[in-house]
Amino acid sequence: MSVSDMWRTNIATLVLMIFVNLGLFALQNRLAWMVLGLLLLAGSLYLCFRQGMGYGHEACGLLQTVKKAQDPTSPTHGQIDEKVAKRAWSVGHGLRAALSFALPAYVIGCAYIICSLAGFEPLVLPLRLISWILAAPFWPCVLGWTETFDRLTPSVVAVLMISPFVLPMTTFAGYMQGPRLWAKSEKAMAEGKRRAKAKSRVVRQKRVPRSQKPEI
């Protein structure tokens, strides 16, 4: 998984969730927003996890290509594209992609909190608006504990500090399943080949003509 893969997947999911939650917020029905928002959040996390699994499985395939290119005895030794190597499975690659996506929203949330505590009013309102919109998909999680979002209550601070990491780290968790999925698919392919060979041997044996006995 590359950084661009993570960004494409998570930004599309986040934008969709923001628009839906803004629409639910406009209905002025807290219960509907909380219930539907939580359902949307759960579904989005599931899709991010599944997408991460796909990235992890694909990256493990690229990792095998990189290993072959690094093997001196391999015919493809030294014949590896740097872009392919960067997309090969690695905990560092996946974690770097996740954190790079979370960082902008996290910095904006921190800036809003700092400016609010310092009383720097010119920046408080715009930073509050931006951070509120970016965290919109996660406000249903705290609707039972907070009435407004314009004050730095513990629940509001928690959402601002945690929400930037939820989607990318969920994708990263799916990405970490890559080696297990790759081993499973390789095992299934090996078993399929063994069954195919066994079946072909049986077919050949059935096709062997029987020798005719000499007539007396």
Image: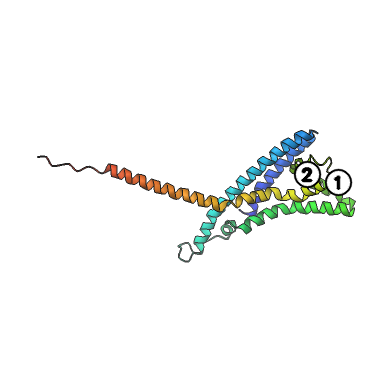
Q: CA distance from mark 2 to mark 1?
A: 15 Å
Q: Is residue 104 above or below residue 36?
A: below
Between 92 and 194, the one nearer to me in the picture: 194
Q: Of the residues shown, which amino acid type is indicated by label 2?
A: Ile
Side (left or right) of 63 relative to 23: left
Q: Of the residues shown, which amino acid type is indicated by label 1?
A: Arg
Between 149 and 74, the one nearer to me in the picture: 149
Query: Is there a contact, CB below 8 Å, between mark 2 and mark 1?
Result: no
Q: Is residue 78 above or below residue 176?
A: below
Q: Is residue 34 above or below residue 52?
A: above
- Examine the rendering and report whether any part of residue 25 can be seen: yes
Whole-percent x and y of residue 79?
Answer: 51, 62
Side (left or right) of 181 relative to 33: left
Whole-percent x and y of residue 190?
Answer: 44, 50
Whole-percent x and y of residue 93?
Answer: 63, 57
Residue found farthest to the front: 145
- Residue at 68%, 43% in the rendered image: 13
- What residue did someone put label 2 on? 133
- What residue did someone put label 1 on? 151
- Residue at 79%, 47% in the rendered image: 131
- Residue at 28%, 42% in the rendered image: 207
